[in-house]
Amino acid sequence: MLPKTLEYYRLREEIEEFLYEEAALLDERHYTEWLTLLTDDLAYFMPLRRNVKFGEQAARENTRIGKDISWFDEDKWTLSKRVEQIMTGIHWAEEPFSRVCRLISNVQLTDATPSLDAPQELTVRSRFLIYQNRVEYETNLFVGKRNDILRRAGDSWKIARREIILEQSVLTAKNLTVIF
């Protein structure tokens, strides 16, 4: 963890605003603009969660990036293709569009490279709650945490890596069209 200095709190506020703006872009379906917040070498990963015996959680609870099956193991190109598909208007799982509202909270900066005073990359963890409603009766609730690496891009930030940990081992939604 980083020391809780004035610089830490200033930077955390900046990152919170970045994450809130990202959430607004996604909730308002500005997907093309959202893609500009991603680095070209983005890694976007959501492991499957498994129920394992006590003591085996660290080694076996989550599937591993590049080694095991996962909900998402994507890059910027595949995400842009998902966006293109959704925006055709003939994507069966998003026609009509879902109504989505997300809350981002518990934002913490856990590492800064090279330093907290002049960071070029930040490791950030946060929590999310996403409500999705589609047509009259389909509702889904997604709860979890994200581990992000944000990279400085001029006077702003871009997402270089996102790991999404969904707090359920069985997916009850009919599809995963939500972008986390």
Image: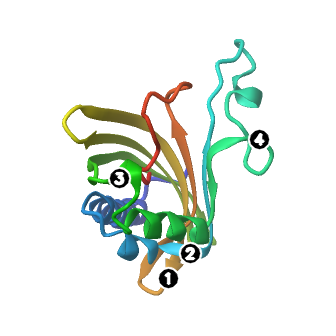
Label located before the other in sequence (3 or 1): 3
Of circles 4 and 3, the one toward us is: 3
- Residue at 29% across / 40% down in the picture? 131
Return the residue found at the far bottom.
154
- Residue at 46% across / 41% down in the picture? 175
The residue lying toward the viewer, choosing from 116 and 58, is 58
Label located before the other in sequence (4 or 3): 4
- Residue 47 placement: quadrant: top right
Label located before the other in sequence (2 or 3): 2
Left or right: 48 in relation to 34: right
The residue under label 4 is 68
- Asked whether disc 4 touches disc 3, contact meaning CB atoms under 8 Å apart, the reply is no
Instruction: Identify the secondary structure beneath mark 4.
Output: loop
The residue under label 3 is 94
Dot 2, how many residues are within 10 Å of its Cα: few (below 14), some (14-19), or many (20+)? some
Q: Position of residue 133 (x, y in %)?
A: 25, 40
The residue lying toward the viewer, choosing from 35 and 56, is 35
Label number found at residue 39: 2
Label located before the other in sequence (2 or 1): 2
Calculate the distance from the C-alpha at mark 3 to the C-alpha at mark 1.
32 Å
Q: Position of residue 42 (x, y in %)?
A: 61, 68
The residue under label 1 is 153
Instruction: Identify the secondary structure beneath mark 1.
Output: strand
Q: Is residue 117 above or below residue 112?
A: below
Q: Where is residue 105 in the image (x, y as percent from the top left)?
A: 34, 45
Instruction: Identify the secondary structure beneath mark 2.
Output: strand
- Residue 84 placement: quadrant: bottom left
Calculate the distance from the C-alpha at mark 2 to the C-alpha at mark 1.
9 Å
- Residue at 27% across / 57% down in the picture? 27
The three-letter code of the residue at mark 3 reads Glu
